[in-house]
Structure formats: structure tokens, C-alpha cells
């Protein structure tokens, strides 16, 4: 399928391999192996002269290949790779392109920080994690000649925005690749390759899956950069199961409509909470008063379904608000059709010391919301009720 089509058309049609009975979608091929008419035919696939199926762990399975074409189309990329989880995608990426050092700018997902801080240094990979003012001195860090610059934007839970174009320009001038974890925005709201990043990273567990029932990960980018990652995926055995791949493809067909509704709902909740007397701060990039609203507008076409509220009260009072939510579920994760809430100090940032939390701008009174597809009026009523219990 050509790239002339709009994103929502690609989501429905890209990569679909119609089945023998005229099925509109690629069937689920559970087979672990695939047969050939002759050794010559087998060698054509093994040696890459012909596209074809061979062995599922390699990704050479029709259901997986079909999904990867669809994933590539989401970020308008030449190629896509699917993984058993978002962390699997990151690990393979770091091994393939981060061996000369990895810079991770700003707040990142807890698992990412653990991998970069505790594990990769054990195998000799240098990692640099500039935060706050150090980000302004990124050039200093780049003098160590890292091979990869990695970041999220917006970040969790403070919704900090990083300038994708200018960081990419700086990183490229030092010969480094740029990979962006685009999980929070989703490709519907932010096209990172079009903003000069090299590789898009996704936890497909979040918006791409969208129903809190798929664990997966994805990388999208030029074939030349994904080929070395593919070898790591193959031999670390990080492949997603075909049944899960079919479920993820099913979810992707409705990605734009879900994300657009979540954008609208989050904006409505953010607006309502920004005038609530018990809310001291609303961190949502779509609000005009958000400090980085202009930067967000310059690189995002929608502002996403994640927002963080700061309650005008103590950590304990904030917990009481969370515990009094009835419709909104107390749970980590994000991107599903149902709204979720967590207090970062009890989940995503539980393991950090108070000093480290302060350095990352995380307070006891913050609640991070992943806004789903419910009627926004109902979400606002739920929040108002919970806030009245302080
Ligand atoms: C959840 C998440 C990950 C990790 O993804 P898993 O699918 O849980 O492995 C990475 N980055 C971000 C931003 C996430 O939200």
C-alpha cells in the first residue's frame, strides 16, 4: 500500500493480506514453521531474495509481517518491527544502537530508567541521564560521543515537552541516532520521524493496543537502522505470538478514532479541573496556560489523553481523592478505553528517594490520569465527587 493514504485509511488497510475465503483481514497463522516446495525455494527466503514465511520467532510469519507493515505506516516509516513488549523493543534497540553509549533525556518510563541505570552498565554500556538544567548542557554530554539519544515527549508524569527538531539536529551533528518513545502521544498526535527523529519506539501495550488486553512493543524507522535490531530480537527471542499480533492489528484499525476521542475527553477534564478550587495545577499540554503549550503545538497535532492534576492538599488527602473515584479505576498503565488514575508516588515513581522525586518535579499531591473513551461529563462528575471528600 502506498504512503499517499491518510493515517486512518492506513490503519484499516495497510499490511492486510486477504485470506483464501476473501477475509478482509490477515488470518491468524499460528504455525511456528512453514514448508517449501524445494530447497531452492527455501534458500530464496533464507537468503532474503524473496519475501516469505519461514519461522515465527524470526518474524517470518504472515500475521507478524502483516502487522509490521501496518505499524510502519503509522509513523510513515520504511519498516516496522514488533516485539513481545515495549521493554523488549527498547532492550533490542539499546543493544543494536547504544553500545557506544546512550543518553536518555528527562523523565522516562520506570522500566527504561532501571534498564539504563542498573542493567546496561553491567554489560559495559555507558548511559547518561541528564535532567532539568543539565538538559540545557546536552552538548557537554554529547562530547562523550554516545551512539544513541533517547527520550520521551511528553514525559511521565509532569508532561514536560522536548523539542524534537532541535534535539535531533544537535544529536545528528555529533553523529548520534535519535530514538523517541512516542507511546504517550501515539502516532495520531505526533509523527516523530517527520520531526527528524530516526526511530519511533512504542509500548503497544498502551494506545496501539488501546483496550488494556495486549502486551507488545514496536519500533518504526528506516530498514537500514532496523535490520541490526532485528538480529537482536531474533536471538534474544523477543517475538510476539501470532494471536497477539492479530489482536494488535485489530486494535490498530480503530486507533485514530479512539485517540481523537481521548484527546477531546482529556481536554474537557483539563478545562474543568483548571477552575476547580481544590486543584492547584493541571499539567496538560493542550491548555493555553501550560508553560510549554506553544512548543507542544509546534510538534503535536493533538495533545493526548494523559494529564496530571496536583491536588491542593497533602499526599494523604490526595490518596483520599484517588480512593473516592468510582468510575475511574485505580491502576497503573494508560492508553485503554477506560480511564485510569494513579498517584505517581505509589506506583511509577514509588522506588525513588524523596530527593530524586523532587529533582524530577514529582510531588506527593500529583495524580496521573489516563483518560479513556467514557462521556467526559461522567468523568468530571466522578472527579468532582472525589474532590469533595477531602
Ligand atoms: C509502558 C511503557 C513502556 C514499557 O512498555 P511495556 O509494554 O510495559 O514493556 C515504555 N515506555 C512508556 C512511555 C510506557 O508508558
Image: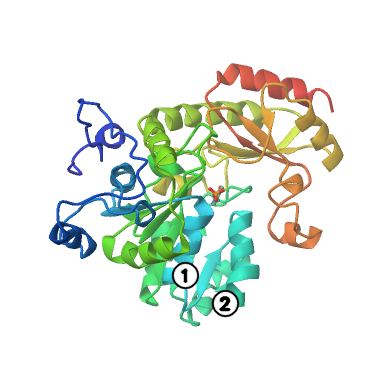
In this picture, residue 136 sits left or right of residue 382: left
Q: Quadrant of the C terminus?
A: top right
Does residue 288 appear anywhere in the picture? yes
Q: How many numbered discs sit on the rendered protein?
A: 2
Does residue 197 appear anywhere in the picture? no
- Residue 96, percent across and down? 42, 69
- Residue 56, percent across and down? 36, 51
Residue pointed to by mark 2:
123
Q: Residue at x 64, y 55 (%)?
A: 110
Which sits in the foreground, 347 or 120?
120
Residue pointed to by mark 1:
95
Q: Residues within 10 Å of mark 2 (few under 14, many from 20)?
A: few
Specify the quadrant of the image occupied by residue 132.
bottom right
Q: Residue at x 50, y 30 (%)?
A: 262
Which sits in the foreground, 285 or 102?
102
Which sits in the foreground, 135 or 186?
186
Amino acid at each position: 500500500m502506498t504512503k499517499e493514504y491518510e493515517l486512518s485509511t492506513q490503519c484499516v488497510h495497510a499490511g492486510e493480506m486477504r485470506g483464501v475465503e476473501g477475509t478482509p483481514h490477515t488470518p491468524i497463522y499460528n504455525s511456528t514453521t512453514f514448508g517449501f516446495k524445494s530447497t531452492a525455494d527455501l534458500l530464496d527466503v533464507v537468503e532474503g531474495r524473496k519475501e516469505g514465511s519461514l519461522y515465527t520467532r524470526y518474524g517470518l510469519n504472515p500475521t507478524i509481517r502483516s502487522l509490521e507493515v501496518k505499524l510502519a505506516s503509522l509513523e510513515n516509516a520504511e519498516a516496522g518491527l514488533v516485539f513481545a513488549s515495549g521493554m523488549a523493543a527498547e532492550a533490542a534497540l539499546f543493544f543494536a544502537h547504544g553500545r557506544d553509549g546512550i543518553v536518555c533525556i528527562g523523565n522516562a518510563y520506570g522500566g527504561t530508567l532501571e534498564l539504563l541505570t542498573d542493567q546496561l552498565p553491567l554489560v559495559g554500556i555507558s548511559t547518561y541521564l541528564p535532567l532539568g538544567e543539565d538538559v540545557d548542557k546536552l552538548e557537554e554530554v554529547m562530547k562523550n560521543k554516545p551512539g544513541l539519544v533517547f527520550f520521551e515527549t511528553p514525559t511521565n508524569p509532569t508532561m514536560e515537552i522536548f523539542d524534537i527538531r532541535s534535539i535531533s539536529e544537535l544529536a545528528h551533528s555529533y553523529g548520534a541516532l535519535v530514538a523517541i518513545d512516542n507511546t504517550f502521544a501515539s502516532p495520531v498526535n505526533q509523527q516523530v520521524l517527520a520531526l527528524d527523529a530516526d526511530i519511533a519506539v512504542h509500548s503497544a501495550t498502551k494506545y496501539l493496543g488501546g483496550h488494556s488486553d495486549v502486551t507488545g512493543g514496536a519500533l518504526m524507522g528506516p530498514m537500514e537502522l532496523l535490520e541490526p535490531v532485528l538480529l537482536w530480537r531474533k536471538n534474544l527471542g523477543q517475538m510476539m505470538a501470532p494471536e497477539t499480533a492479530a489482536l494488535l492489528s485489530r486494535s490498530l484499525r480503530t486507533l485514530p478514532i479512539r485517540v481523537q476521542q481521548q484527546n477531546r475527553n482529556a481536554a474537557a477534564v483539563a478545562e474543568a479541573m483548571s477552575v476547580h478550587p481544590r486543584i492547584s495545577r493541571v499539567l496538560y499540554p493542550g491548555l493555553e496556560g501550560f508553560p510549554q503549550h506553544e512548543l507542544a503545538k509546534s510538534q503535536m497535532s493533538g495533545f493526548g489523553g494523559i494529564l496530571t492534576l496536583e491536588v491542593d492538599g497533602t499526599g494523604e488527602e490526595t490518596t483520599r481523592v484517588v480512593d473516592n473515584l468510582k468510575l475511574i479505576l485505580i491502576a497503573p498503565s494508560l492508553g485503554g478505553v477506560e480511564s485510569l488514575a494513579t498517584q505517581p508516588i505509589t506506583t511509577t515513581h514509588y522506588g525513588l528517594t524523596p530527593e530524586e522525586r523532587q529533582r524530577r518535579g514529582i510531588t506527593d499531591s500529583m495524580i496521573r490520569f489516563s483518560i479513556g473513551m467514557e462521556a467526559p461529563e461522567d468523568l468530571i462528575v466522578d472527579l468532582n465527587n472525589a474532590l469533595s471528600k477531602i
